[in-house]
Amino acid sequence: MGLLQELIFGLVTGSYIAIAAIGFTLIYGIVNMINFAYGEYLTLGAFIGFLAANALPGPLPVAVVAAMIGGGIVSIVLARGFFTPINHTGPVPMLLTSIGLGIALRNAIRLVGGRSARYFETETATFRFDAIPDVPVGPVDLLGGFFVTSEHLIVIGSAVAVFVSIHALLTRTDVGIAMRAMGDDESLARVRGIDTQLIRDSVWVLAGVLAGLAGVLMAVQTNVSADTGFSHILQILSAAILGGAGSPYGAILGAYVIGLVLAVSTAFLPSSMTGLSSAMAFVILIAVLLVKPSGIAGTEVREA
Amino acid sequence: MPSDITGRVNRRTLLTVAGAGGIAGLSGCVGFGGDEESGDGGDGSGNDDGDGSGSDDGNGGSDGGGPDTIVFGQPGALTGSFDFLQPGVSQAADAAVRHINEAGGPLDAELELVRRDTGVDPQEARTVTTQLIENDDAAAIVGLFSSEINPLWDFLQDLQTPVVTPWPGSTFLDTRGGDKGTPDDVSDDEWVWRTVVGDTVHTGGSAVYALEEGFETLGIINGNTEGERSYVDGFLSVYEENGGTVAERVEVELGSSSYQSALSRLFDADFDAFLVSMPQESAITALSDWSDGGYGRQPILSDTLAQQAVIDQVGSDLHGAWAASPGRSGPSYDTFEEIYAEEGDAEINGWTPPSWDAVQVTALAIERAGEATPEAIQRNLGPVSRGEGTTVGTFAEGKEALANGEEITYEGAATPVDFTEHGNVFGSVTISTAEEGGFVETTEVPAEDVREYVAEGEY
């Protein structure tokens, strides 16, 4: 198959990562903490979606909405319980707290939910486009026939919907504008009358909603288990840093760079190195940070 | 004021030290290995004094004065990647213990099985094995996986307690373990025995079957862990030696959200069938991607993938896929199955009969030795399994024959349990094919057919 097909696979992988990375980077940019427990937020979203799919009547989108609402509630409850009380201590204690919370949540989920994987019952349709001509350049075919599945389209469509919504939120609503103001300078935002705690809470809810959506999408493609989110946290973190920590637009860009590198490196690395595709994504991350320490779209290096 | 502060610090220090000491003290008493199922530590097994009879050469039998309780330790996968296989293995071991006790027990003692969870984690396995031997006085260990044994190899040799395990397939053990054909001389022994056929045998059986079916060119997708590589390497050693060729091999990371890029690369090559060697959850994702992409061709699955859940999730495209597993039908399979069914309703898998065999053959070794020390068991595992004596299918038969002064040869439920010099067994290989209702056993590759592909002394 050609490069076009690999780009589609990369777009799909990037879309999963991007939705989660936006939530992750919003927390970093506005609450000023790296939330290592974010993978478990995805897992909880996946479990809520799975329970909703089995308990509620209606199609899968109903379960997705339930997971998003549930994710938002879980996120704000956890934030109020564990992060808000130590907000003043700075990023390092909050980072360590999030690591501990992540481990505790993961094991609690394993204890309650069991080790076995669960699966969403879905039907997948495949759409083939075999009439596309080959455009070989050396050993690489730039076009060629390709296929997409209904799952691919849903994931990419969901990601686009999230991007548009986030853009509208950040540029057209008072809450979004206040978020950006807080991201730039919290003290100045407070002086201007912005209720910074309310904005923080809004960010936690928004990040939880996005985690719920990303968790269900990942679980539909793979499975629902205690490790559903944790197994992707490094990719999410990398996307956020690669794009410029704190920048939602950078996180989207970073996620697609990682998705495309994963797909293309699996396709074109020598046979003995195909298991190292993730490592290639991190090589790209290191290279970008060496050239531009603030990430692709970042404008500053925050104190940590 | 300063003295108050000093006093407070001292009190805190005292409390901290006392608390830490208390926790440390408790940790020595309380097992954190989880899911200990039974056992109060026993009171006689593993002691050096037993009854002393016939420890070197002999058929001492049970002539009184032995321990009241003998403990076997079973490290298990109650959690972890292979926890779905544990219920059958546990039930088989429990059924074997019940049968042995009903027959009077080894040396007329009560046999106890203490099971602790390792989560298939080498560090946890090290802790659990130590606890079983040191705290529970286990005379023998009847568990441990390849991924636990291989990194803990030197540690297990230092323990000098026989590990008779139904789990490991690793080629690492092909030339490690057993009594080296000299049961009386333990100086050259390695303390691991396995009652399940190694990957070399059943991957060889799978390769033989693939070639017989006319699949002469192969594509391979495997996980990047040692176990998955080992499986593929075992397969290829027989497949390529006998004329098969590999068109493309793609190694993937486990736990990915998609394997489409890897599949796309794999299926660009021209081959007849493709081998999948991945753990179940990752394999379901990969095979679902394969089904969605409409790649077609004949799937060959690694043994752990012959599960109903794989068919349920991948769907009808998987029908016709086959997997080769260690054969389940040794000479005493029917006897095992009858006693096993009385114990519970756990599904029998490829590691269930070997679990029964591990307990049976170890108990027979104690009965022959006349004592329950680890060294005595190690000396007698070979003689009760590969000798020329009376053929026995259960502990009850063996105990009776030994009491009559006869030598015995145990014929197991999974295999004939003729331990090689490296503590390995040969057996048939079962081919199971995916169909509507699950994996159905379609054919069997006899042990003799596979044995001819394994060099003498290399297994």
Image: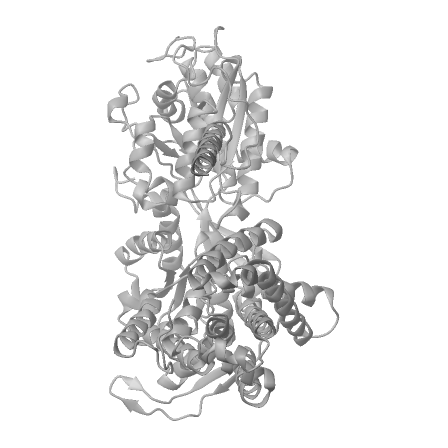
| Color theme of the render | one colour
On screen, residue B368 versus residue B87, left or right, reads left
Decide which of B416, A249 is in the foreground and name it.
A249
- Whether B72 is drawn above or below B238: the answer is above
Q: Is residue B432 visible?
A: no
Total numbered labels: 0
Decide which of B106, A186 is in the foreground and name it.
A186
Q: Residue at x 49, y 85 (%)?
A: A128
Quarter of the figure that contains the N terminus of chain A: bottom left
Quarter of the figure that contains the C terminus of chain A: bottom left
Q: Quadrant of residue B436?
A: bottom right
Q: Residue B385: image x %, image y %?
A: 40, 26
Q: Residue A113: image x %, image y %?
A: 61, 53
- Whether B212 is drawn above or below B269: the answer is above
Q: Quadrant of residue B176?
A: top left
On screen, residue A297 versus residue A220, left or right, reads left
Q: Residue at x 50, y 61 (%)?
A: A37
Q: Residue A11: image x %, image y %?
A: 44, 81
Q: Residue B213: image x %, image y %?
A: 41, 61
- Outermost residue toward the front? B1
Q: Is residue A66 visible?
A: yes
- Whether A108 is drawn above or below B311: the answer is above
Decide which of B219, A229 is in the foreground and name it.
A229
Decide which of B83, B447 is in the foreground and name it.
B83
